Image (tube, grey):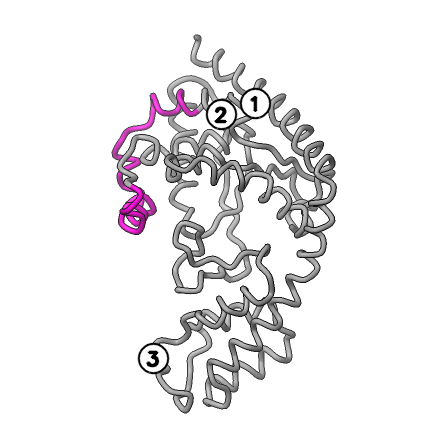
Amino acid sequence: KALQHRYDCFYFIADWHALTSEYASPEIIRKSTIDIIIDWLSVGLDPERCTFFIQSHIKEHAELHLVFSMITPIPWLERNPTYKEQMQELRAKNLNTYGFLGYPVLQAADILMYKADAVPVGEDQAPHLELTREIARRFNFLYKDVFPEPETLLTPTSKLLGIDRRKMSKSYNNAIFITEPPDDVSKKVSQMITDPQRGRKTDPGRPEICNVFSYHEIYSPEEKVKEIEEGCKTAGIGCVECKRLMAENLNKGLDPIRQKRKELESDMAYVEDIIREGNKRAKDIAQKTMQEVREAIGI
């Protein structure tokens, strides 16, 4: 949210990316598209300050992806640690496809299409961004300097993990969604894994590695965070009570978002206008970039 006040930000629905793992269930992607944009608006992203668009509506992304696929060595993709990890984690989805292997190439096209100077990423996505930089460098070397090499913007806020301490992901069924009712949020919080070495309430805990405490640091009042940290270290507070307090504060933080969401859902024409305008702006930039790309290659 803060980035929109410092940068010209582009936020897009990566529906083609979603298709790499949900190719057998495209209806999931269709349903999620509008929901995600409403989520963005609900948390405070301002369409007057940034651009929202849908990836598949900008066909130039597919063209640039094709161009980049011609110059990207396969070993660059195979060494990607995220690829190997997700192949293991999502074995049931049969991700042994060209599209899934080439996911980072499409990601590079998404980024470089708009000549981004910087990209906010989680640590797990840093290798993907480095690959984007390598692809930009290789294109510029082979043809002409068209693309900048974007820098990494790592968030100063700690990454919130899923309830099982893995990366939060819909695919892993471990996410807490801002659209969920308070009771559902509380139920998920009650299932969260805490300090695995704290087997009893009387055992002192380690808040620095506790998943629940990382949520407290964001959603609980500062004085309460200090109290919980000390209580955990001295076994003055148990995990059940700690989770209850966190769920209460998390729901307080989500309440304004839920309310804004209801307002937006009752004015879908407004949401559709935002998408239409964002698609148009993205399309204009993408067409100019692809003209440069074609001229650089000479085809």
Most frequent secondary structure within the magenta stretch: helix
Question: Which amino acid, mark 3?
Answer: Gln
Residue 61's disc is 2
SS for tag 2?
helix
Residue 71 drawn in magenta: yes
Residue 256 drawn in magenta: no
Considering depth in this image, is 232 or 112 the residue closer to the camera?
Answer: 232
The answer to whether 195 appears left or right of 250 in the picture is left
Percent from the top left, x then y, of residue 156? 55, 58
Considering depth in this image, is 119 or 57 the residue closer to the camera?
Answer: 57
Establish if 115 lies above or below 165. above
Task: Say which residue label 3 marks.
Answer: 197
Percent from the top left, x then y, of residue 96? 26, 37
What span is colored magenta in the figure?
65-93
SS for tag 3?
loop
Establish if 86 lies above or below 254. above
Q: CA distance from mark 2 to mark 1?
A: 8 Å
Residue 286's disc is 1
At x 48%, y 13%, the residue is 294
Establish if 258 lies above or below 294. below
| Circles 2, 1 touching at the beta carbon (< 8 Å) | yes
Give the image quarter of residue 278.
top right
